[in-house]
Image (cartoon, rainbow, N blue to C red):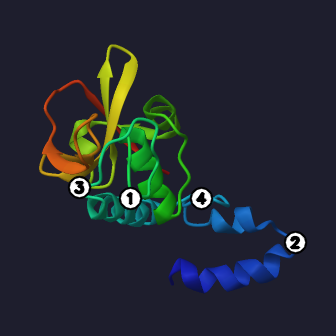
Amino acid sequence: MTAQVHVPSLLVRAGTASVLTLAAVGTTMFAPGAATDAQAATLSMKALNIAASKKGSPYRWGATGPNRFDCSGLTLYSFKKAGKKLPRTAQQQYNRTRHISASHRQRGDLVFFHSGRSIYHVGIYAGKGKIWHSPRTGAVVRLEKIWTKSVYYGRVR
C-alpha cells in the first residue's frame, strides 16, 4: 500500500491533529508560505524572461523600471513582476537569498559580484556562464559573459 492509502485513515484517527503534523507524513515537511524547489525554479525562470524582455533598456543609477534600470533595480523589477518582492540593493538581495555554489547554480539564480565581503553588482544567471544585467552608466540591459570568478550565487526563495 502507498502512503496515499494510509492518509485518509490517519485523518480519521487523528481527529484534531494539526495540518502540519499530517503534512509531515512520509518525511516531507511542508511549511505554510514556503516555496517548493519547483515553485522557486518557475519563479526564477519567469524573472529571467522578464529581465531578458528588457534588453536594450538604458542604465540609470537608482532606477527600478519599467524603462530604465540600475543592476539591482533590474533584479528587483524582474522578480516583482514574477511574483516575489526583493529588497532594493544588491547587498540586501544577497542577504535575502539562499547562497549556493557555482556547481549548483541554475538559470534564474542571482549572480552577485563582490570585492572581499562587499557586494557591488548583481545580475540574473542565464546559463552557459552568462547573465542578464544592467551594467553601468552609458550601457543598456544586456546578456553578457560573467567576466570574473569573484561572484557568489543566490537562489530567491
Which residue appears at 32% of the width and 59% of the height?
48
N-term-proximal mark, 2 vs 1: 2
CA gap between label 4 and label 3 equals 43 Å
Label 1 amino acid? Ser
Task: Identify the residue under disc 4.
Answer: 29
Q: Would you place residue 87 above or below residue 106 in this image?
A: above
- Residue 156, horizontal then vertical, whole percent: 45, 49
- 4 vs 3, front mark: 3
Residue 139: in sight, yes or no?
Answer: yes
Task: Identify the residue under disc 1.
Answer: 44
- Residue 77, horizontal then vertical, whole percent: 46, 54
CA gap between label 4 and label 1 equals 22 Å
- Taking depth in this image into account, of 47 and 13 the one nearest to the observer is 47
Q: Residues within 10 Å of mark 2 (few under 14, many from 20)?
A: few
N-term-proximal mark, 2 vs 3: 2
Q: Residues within 10 Å of mark 1 (few under 14, many from 20)?
A: many
Q: Residues within 10 Å of mark 3 (few under 14, many from 20)?
A: some
Task: Identify the residue under disc 2.
Answer: 16
N-term-proximal mark, 1 vs 3: 1
Label 3 amino acid? Gly
- 2 vs 3, front mark: 3
CA gap between label 2 and label 3 equals 57 Å
N-term-proximal mark, 4 vs 1: 4
**Disc 4, SS:** loop
Answer yes or no: do the residues labelled 2 and 1 have beta carbons within 8 Å? Answer: no
Task: Identify the residue under disc 3.
Answer: 56
CA gap between label 1 and label 3 equals 21 Å
Corner quadrant of residue 17:
bottom right
CA gap between label 2 and label 1 equals 37 Å
**Disc 2, SS:** loop
